[in-house]
Image (spheres, grey):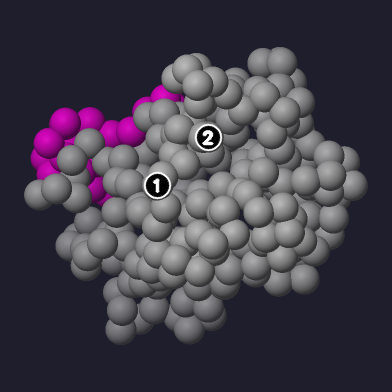
């Protein structure tokens, strides 16, 4: 099999949560460019409509579904819609996420629960559902979980006082290891990506406050771009990663290496 064939996703179906903008849209573009049909979900219908028009303009076949995945009951209708349209899910990208900035002593419990529910619990619920309905019976699948470099260590509070987010992303990293260990026997690969700082709607406040700190602590002296997640997404979604499971790959310009 050629390298081109290893990365070819023609005929595959990918479901990407939080796929309407930012990192989710970048990863959706990558999968679509390689031939996959893409289903994207997000809370805001208008953002989904804009993303759909953008992706169709690239020649990508796309399905949208508005849902708030912090409500566990929303996962079922989402999966049913994708299966009703295309009959399967070959690739699941668990990307939807939220953050909250506050010192630990003042962090609201409601905000903690909001972050954990979306960043971690929703990932478990959707992975479990797709696994039981599709991937385990078929004996194949690729799951990509979006963690963060914030999940590897504590962070300087002047940079990012986000204890719930950091905790949730550490949970994603070990969820990825644990699920990969359990489901390898079913032919399912479970891996993660830990992005560094990428300009986005969610990271804007942090960047406005600490841009120079970020640059100074990144060996490559820059933040992520609209292209920097595409390669690793293509790898983990394709046959090129068939002997890789349980790992989370930092994409951070070296930030986590220091």
Residue 130 visible? The answer is: no
Q: Which residue is mark 1?
A: 244
Return the residue nearer the eye: 198 or 149: 149
Point 51% across, 35% down: residue:
239
Name the secondary structure under disc 2: loop
Q: Are marks 2 and 1 in contact (CB under 8 Å)?
A: no
The percent coordinates of residue 191 (x first, y second) are 44, 52
Residue topped by disc 2: 238
Instruction: Compute the Cα span from label 2 to label 1.
Output: 11 Å
Residue at the spot x=71%, y=22% of the render? 60
Query: Which residue is more in the foreground, 58 or 115?
Result: 58
Q: Element under label 1?
A: loop
17 or 105, nearer to the observer: 17
Q: Which comes before the other along the chain, label 2 or label 1? A: 2
Tag 2: Cα neighbours inside 10 Å, few (<14), some, or many (≥20)? many
Measuring from the top left, give residue 69's x and y in whole percent. Answer: 67, 62
The question of residue 224 being in magenta is answered with yes
Percent position of residue 168, x then y: 42, 69
Q: Is residue 75 above or below residue 201?
A: below
Q: From where the camera sits, is residue 31 visible?
A: yes
User: Does residue 180 belong to the magenta stretch?
Assistant: no
Which span of residues is magenta-colored?
204-227
The residue lying at 48 percent from left, 83 percent from top is 109
Identity of the residue furthest to the right in this view: 84
| Image position of 76 (left or right of 155) | right
């Amino acid at each position: 099999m050629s390298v081109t064939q290893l990365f070819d996703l023609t005929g595959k179906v990918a479901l990407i949560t939080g796929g309407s903008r930012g990192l989710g849209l970048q990863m959706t573009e990558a999968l679509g460019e390689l031939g996959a049909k893409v289903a994207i979900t997000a809370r805001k219908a208008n953002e989904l409509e804009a993303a759909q028009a953008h992706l169709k303009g690239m020649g990508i076949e796309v399905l949208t579904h508005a849902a708030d995945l912090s409500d566990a009951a929303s996962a079922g209708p989402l999966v049913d819609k994708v299966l009703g349209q295309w009959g399967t899910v070959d690739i699941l990208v668990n990307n939807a996420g939220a953050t909250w900035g506050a010192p630990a002593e003042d962090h609201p419990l409601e905000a903690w629960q909001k972050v954990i529910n979306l960043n971690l619990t929703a990932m478990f619920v959707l992975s479990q559902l797709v696994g039981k309905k599709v991937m385990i019976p078929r004996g194949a699948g690729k799951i990509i979980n979006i963690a963060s470099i914030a999940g590897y260590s504590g962070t300087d509070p002047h940079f990012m006082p986000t204890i719930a987010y950091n905790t949730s992303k550490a949970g994603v990293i070990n969820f990825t290891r644990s699920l990969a260990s359990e489901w390898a026997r079913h032919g399912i690969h479970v891996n993660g990506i830990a992005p560094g700082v990428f300009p986005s709607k969610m990271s804007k406040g942090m960047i406005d406050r600490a841009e120079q700190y970020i640059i100074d602590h990144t060996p490559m002296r820059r933040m992520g771009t609209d292209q920097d997640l595409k390669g690793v997404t293509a790898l983990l979604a394709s046959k090129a990663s068939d002997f890789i499971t349980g790992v989370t790959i930092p994409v951070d310009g070296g930030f986590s290496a220091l």
